[in-house]
Image (cartoon, rainbow, N blue to C red):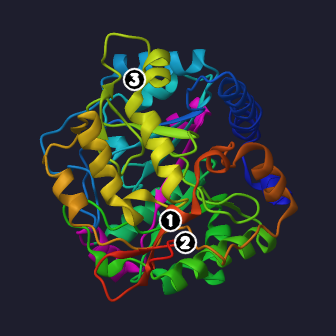
Amino acid sequence: MARRFALETDKRLLAKAVWMLGVKGLRSIHRHKRRLKKGEFFPPFLYMSVINSCNLRCQGCWVDVAAKQHKIELDAATRTIEQAKAMGNSFFGILGGEPFMHKDLLTLFERHRDVYFQVFTNGHFITDEVAQRLRACGNVTPLISVEGSEIISDTRRGRDGVLNQTMAGIEAAVRNKLLVGVCTSVCKSNIDDLVNERWVDRLIEMGVMYCWFHIYRPVGPEPNPQLALSSEEQRRVRQFVVDTRATKPIVVIDAYHDDAGNALCPAVTGFTHHIGPWGDIEPCPVIQLATESIHDDRPLKDTFNNSNFLKDFRELTAGQTRGCVIMERPDLLVELAEKHGARDTTARGGVIDELKNVSPRRSQYQPGDEIPERSFVYRWAKKYAFNDFGTYAKHFDPTKYQDPDDKSDSPELVQIGDASS
């Protein structure tokens, strides 16, 4: 890995990533820990969906990509980033829709050269010209999604020729010496094609520096639950991630486990929250409920610190499961929305009904089947920078966990630890 970084990267871009994402990123986490000790809260990392529009129509997409275009304007995004920087933040995830459809996106990156951006994109808008501007900025890494073989990609993403355009975007980014990542929402139709050494080796040969395998979440207006992985398949993905980290010269991101393999949710631990295209402050991108907005007439610091909805979300969810609440306990989100009068932040206005129609299934929480990290480097990094920050130790009650895999004769889920079950 060190050899690849030494020989294959633009050293200026590498230095900026090490400083802003590495050194300053660790500082932001340290500040987060200090705030928590004082009973204060502000997430050290923020994700921002800057636009709802997209050129694709992916299966399981929760964003209103076909609705009238709405975006976070440049000035509003700048105010949000400036306020987060004042709290010590130095990293921002940029999502959509398709972020590169936002006409001011590159200007936003150029305006904030002192922080680091990760852009979740399908890669179709990354030309040599765009890649050259990103290289000049030096503070952006594109995370380009690949969803399978050519046929699978076209099916999953609702258009013909998707994979070829995505690969062209990857090639343009690599050709211009950007630090490039590739992510995959792993589902039943692509697990055999992409969760294997052959695919990882191809990424390394192409010059991709990191990858991210996250499990498919059947959410949104057309959730396609038939694509969701079984518990066994999810364990297979987790084992592959752990093994790849220890054996391949490529960084593998994992946002859902600590060093010992214990499951966690970054939104529940307070590691990150999300801002939608309309400016709504949500727990995470797939939970489209909010009571606050970046457009509210008060500082973002006060909004995060005083949000009863977000605080209740973190504590209630942490008490019931260590996994993904929208997959395992959608009823909790309905309960929270009703309790706090949270608004549906979509254009379609059907989120509550969608949650009520979700069939609970296991996510990253696989009690008794935890797979610890093999790599010393990842173990160390997670011990310091990516763990539950005491959230589950404080709130999680195993007797309240309802295991979606444990069915009874009743249609209700069995409550683990309840003698009556």
Q: Is residue 406 left or right of residue 358?
A: right
Q: Is residue 136 left or right of residue 283?
A: right
- Do labels 2 and 1 touch, CB within 8 Å? yes
Calculate the distance from the C-alpha at mark 2 to the C-alpha at mark 1. 8 Å
Calculate the distance from the C-alpha at mark 1 to the C-alpha at mark 3. 38 Å
- The residue located at (22%, 61%) in the rendering is 356
Please determine whether, in this image, residue 355 is positioned above or below residue 235.
above
Task: Name the front one of labels 1 and 3.
Answer: 1
Q: How many marks?
A: 3
Please state, as top left, top right, bottom left or bottom right, where the N terminus lies in the image.
bottom right
- The residue located at (53%, 77%) in the rendering is 234
Q: Earlier in the sequence, mark 2 or mark 1?
A: 1
Q: Is residue 111 visible?
A: no
- Mark 3: which amino acid? Ala
Assign a secondary structure to mark 1.
Answer: loop
Assign a secondary structure to mark 3.
Answer: helix
Q: Earlier in the sequence, mark 1 or mark 3?
A: 3
Please determine whether, in this image, residue 224 is positioned above or below residue 391.
below
The percent position of residue 322, horizontal first and vertical second, equals 55, 59
- Mark 2: which amino acid? Gly
| Residue topped by disc 2 | 417
- Mark 1: which amino acid? Tyr
- Do labels 1 and 3 touch, CB within 8 Å? no
- The residue located at (62%, 24%) in the rendering is 39
The image's mark for residue 401 is 1
